[in-house]
Image (cartoon, grey):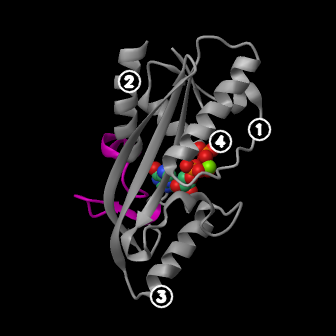
Amino acid sequence: MKIVIASANKGKIAEFQKLMPDDEVVAFSEILGEIEIDEDQDSFKGNAIKKAQTIYDLLIEKGFTNIIVISDDSGISVPVLNNEPGIYSARYAGINASDKDNNAKLISKLNELNLEKTPAFYTACIALVYNNQVYTVHGWMHGNVINKELGENGFGYDPIFIPNGFDKTLGELPNEVKKEFSHRSKALNLANKVLDVIL
Ligand SMILES: O=P(O)(O)OP(=O)(O)OP(=O)(O)OC[C@H]1O[C@@H](n2cnc3c(O)ncnc32)[C@H](O)[C@@H]1O
Ligand SMILES: [Mg+2]
């Protein structure tokens, strides 16, 4: 089945392709080119719906029929920092901030509090649009963030995130390990259950 991913994040798109090996998973940019969507909603859910619906409407306008669009709005929350950066994870260190910039900002916040390590969790909201109906599901992954980057695997905050039950960061652990229990995998499992019912 052809599923259009309403994301411009290469790390996320790669994870979706690995998580759905039997489907044809296409990034929206391959069909529509580059599009900026203003993530101005106040929740992961609001932004996920906005991204999925925007791409779905553009594809319908182009004459596509019977398509499934999936978006992902996600981020990391650190309770000791009042759940920062949360929905602002992509632009924590400013608009157009790189993963390195965002990790450096989070590390500096930990250092200000003299913390080498503190609990944190990832959230992913996946919005799915099919037949002009929107469905949303969430997944979470708990662990700790540390005040140094370790490893090159994954993307985003993965080099500073140690999932519960492990003593290595997601930057050090193989991608296959993250796939087993990530916020994105858990949300996608629920999205697949929705697809089982609506298709
Ligand atoms: O909106 P799209 O186009 O999907 O791409 P994005 O990178 O802007 O994605 P978000 O708006 O959802 O922001 C998510 C932020 O949280 C980070 N993030 C989300 N999931 C992650 C994961 O599995 N591992 C590491 N960082 C993650 C990611 O690096 C971004 O900085
Ligand atoms: Mg975004």
**Number of numbered tags placed on the structure image:** 4
Dot in front, 2 or 4: 2
Q: Which residue is mark 1?
A: 34
Judged from the image, the secondary structure of the residue bearing numbered disc 2 is helix
Comes first in the chain, label 4 or label 1: 4
Q: Marks 4/3: CA distance?
A: 33 Å
Is residue 156 at all visible to an observer of this figure?
no
Q: Amino acid at mark 3?
A: Glu
Residue 166 lies in the magenta-colored region: yes
Comes first in the chain, label 2 or label 3: 3
Comes first in the chain, label 2 or label 4: 4
Q: Marks 3/1: CA distance?
A: 38 Å
Which image quadrant is residue 194 in? top left
Q: Are marks 3 and 1 in contact (CB under 8 Å)?
A: no
Q: Which residue is mark 2?
A: 194
Q: Amino acid at mark 1?
A: Glu
**Residue 175 tag number:** none
Label 1 environment density (alpha carbons within 10 Å; few <14, some 14–19, many ≥20): few
Q: Say above or below: 90 vs 62.
A: below
What residue sits 76% from the left and 17% below the top?
A: 62
What residue sits 55% from the left and 36% below the top?
A: 71
**Residue 112 tag number:** 3
The image shows residue 112 at horizontal and vertical percentages of: 47, 88
Judged from the image, the secondary structure of the residue bearing numbered disc 3 is helix
Q: Marks 1/2: CA distance?
A: 29 Å
Horizontal placement of 63 versus 91: left or right? right
The image shows residue 114 at horizontal and vertical percentages of: 40, 88
Q: Which residue is mark 4?
A: 8
The answer to whether the residue bearing label 4 lies less than 8 angstroms from the nearest atom of ligand 1 is yes
Q: Which residues are magenta?
A: 159-182
Comes first in the chain, label 3 or label 1: 1
The answer to whether the residue bearing label 2 lies less than 8 angstroms from the nearest atom of ligand 1 is no
